[in-house]
Image: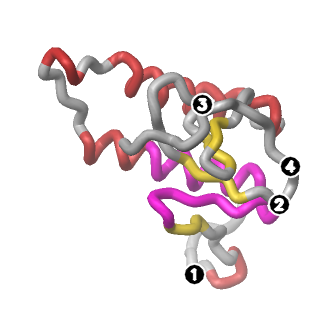
């Protein structure tokens, strides 16, 4: 992980690009290279905050200086799923990025599914 130019935390405004990424002690959500200071800045639901805390705790608890490795494929899959869930929660109010790729919502009108929607 490359070092951020500025790790001073701050809050987001509507329309900011949000990046799901990790660094020691971060929330896992970045705005313009700066760490989001609090999840409440985005009014995220508790279940999503807990998922982000699990992911950041996973990263913060591993000890690479002792030769400990992290299962990078699994860790990245979890991070990608966080980016997707974040996009589903914030909708079109923010663009969400994972590894420099924008996460887009699925067009529900194009989904071909034999399972009827719940009413």
User: Measured along the vertical axis of the image, is residue 103 above or below residue 16?
Assistant: below
Q: How crowded is the residue under tag 1: few (<14 C-alpha within 10 Å), some, or many (20+)?
A: few
Specify whether residue 88 is painted magenta.
yes
Which span of residues is magenta-colored?
79-100
Name the front one of labels 2 and 1: 2
Specify whether residue 81 is painted magenta.
yes
As measured in the structure, the alpha-carbon distance from the residue carrying label 4 to the one carrying label 1 is 35 Å
As measured in the structure, the alpha-carbon distance from the residue carrying label 2 to the one carrying label 1 is 31 Å
The residue at which mark 3 appears reads as 27
Q: Which mark is residue 15?
A: 2
Locate the C terminus and report the quarter of the image it occupies.
bottom right
Q: How crowded is the residue under tag 2: few (<14 C-alpha within 10 Å), some, or many (20+)?
A: few
The residue at which mark 4 appears reads as 13
Q: How crowded is the residue under tag 3: few (<14 C-alpha within 10 Å), some, or many (20+)?
A: many
Numbered disc total? 4
Find out whether the residues at labels 2 and 4 contact each other: C-beta distance under 8 Å.
yes
As rendered, which of 106 and 10 lies closer to the eye? 10
Q: Secondary structure at mark 4?
A: loop
Q: Secondary structure at mark 3?
A: loop
Find out whether the residues at labels 2 and 3 contact each other: C-beta distance under 8 Å.
no
Sequence-wise first label, 3 or 4: 4
The residue at which mark 1 appears reads as 112
**Residue 1 appears at what percent x and percent y?**
36, 42
**Residue 111 appears at what percent x and percent y?**
61, 78
Find out whether the residues at labels 2 and 1 contact each other: C-beta distance under 8 Å.
no
Does residue 25 appear to the left or right of 6 in the view shown? left
């Amino acid at each position: 992980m490359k070092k951020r130019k500025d790790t001073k935390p701050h809050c987001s405004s509507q329309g900011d690009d949000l990046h799901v990424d990790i660094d020691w002690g971060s929330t896992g959500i970045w705005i313009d290279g700066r760490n989001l200071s609090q999840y409440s800045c985005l009014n995220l639901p508790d279940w999503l905050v807990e998922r982000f805390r699990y992911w950041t705790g996973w990263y913060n608890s591993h000890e690479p200086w002792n030769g400990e490795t992290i299962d990078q494929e699994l860790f990245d899959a979890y991070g990608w799923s966080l980016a997707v869930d974040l996009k589903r929660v914030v909708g079109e109010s923010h663009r969400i990025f994972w590894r420099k790729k924008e996460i887009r919502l699925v067009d529900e009108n194009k989904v071909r599914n034999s399972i009827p929607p719940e009413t």
